[in-house]
Image: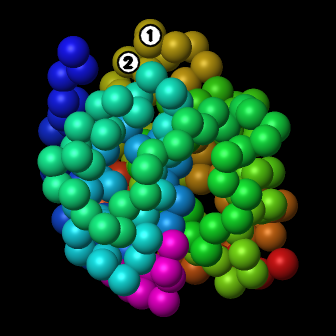
Amino acid sequence: MTQKPFSQACENNKAPILAVLKTAFADISEVLEIGTGTGQHAVYFAQHLAHASWQPSDVAEHLPGINLWLDEVQLNNIEVPVALNVLDENWPITSAQAVFTSNTLHIMGRKEVEHFFIKLGELLADGGKFCCYGPFNYGGQFTSQSNARFNGWLYQQNPKSAIRDFEWIEALAHEAGLQLVGDHHMPANNRLLEWQKVR
């Protein structure tokens, strides 16, 4: 039997993230969340962004846990979670007004991050939004000692994982037709980066 997953980090960061999404997604009617994880964010954001339909997605093994959160709240504006691997050539969702992801880019390998942005450029509509939460380096430097320690822990889990340089991510986003419209400071040395599709 699948046990309902829980992330304390999700509980800690959901309110600060929502404060940004309320503005960033104010005119958005559908959001694709990539890397839904436990499902906590999906439930919380769908509850507070009732004007938008929220589409969770993650690798197949995470879907049962996500469904436990969704079954508990029974919200009308959350869609059935779909299996999505960023390296797949054909994604189950082919268009979206907005995309949200949290704490995923540092888990992915570089090839996965690059492919993620290529697909992002294909599926986002003109004027669409992309919001990405997590830790980032600036100028090749960690923004805190805790981030440096976290990066070491990531490497131990998977040598392909690492806190990504903001400048590299911004270059990938630009190549995908996205323009940075916000770099929001978040608690615990994290950021929420906000882009808009312009071409």
118 to 147, vertically: above or below: below
- Percent x, y of residue 185: 35, 66
* Mark 1 and mark 2 residues within 8 Å of each other at the beta carbon: yes
Q: What residue appears at the point 49 percent right and 80 percent down from the top-left corner?
A: 29
151 to 55, vertically: above or below: above
128 to 120, vertically: above or below: below
Who is closer to the viewer here, 48 or 188? 48
Is residue 123 found left or right of 30 in the rendered image? Answer: right
Circle 1 crowding by C-alpha within 10 Å: few under 14, some 14–19, many from 20: few
- Residue 23 is inside the magenta segment: yes
| Segment tinted magenta in the rendering | 22-30
Q: What residue appears at the point 59 percent right and 53 percent down from the top-left corner?
A: 166
| Element type at mark 2 | helix
Q: Quadrant of residue 186?
A: bottom left
Q: What residue appears at the point 33 percent right and 55 percent down from the top-left corner?
A: 42
Query: Residue 156: which numbered mark, if any?
Result: 1
Of the 4 image quadrants, the one containing the C terminus is bottom right
| Element type at mark 1 | helix
- Dot 2 amino acid type: Trp
Name the residue beneath numbered marker 2: 153
Q: Note whether residue 140 is visible.
A: no
Q: Mark 1 and mark 2: span between their CA atoms?
A: 5 Å
- Dot 1 amino acid type: Gln
Is residue 93 found left or right of 30 in the rendered image? Answer: right
Q: What residue appears at the point 22 percent right and 57 percent down from the top-left corner?
A: 74
- Residue 109 is inside the magenta segment: no
- Percent x, y of residue 26: 42, 87
- Percent x, y of residue 77: 35, 69
Who is closer to the viewer here, 81 or 189? 81
Of the 4 image quadrants, the one containing the N terminus is top left
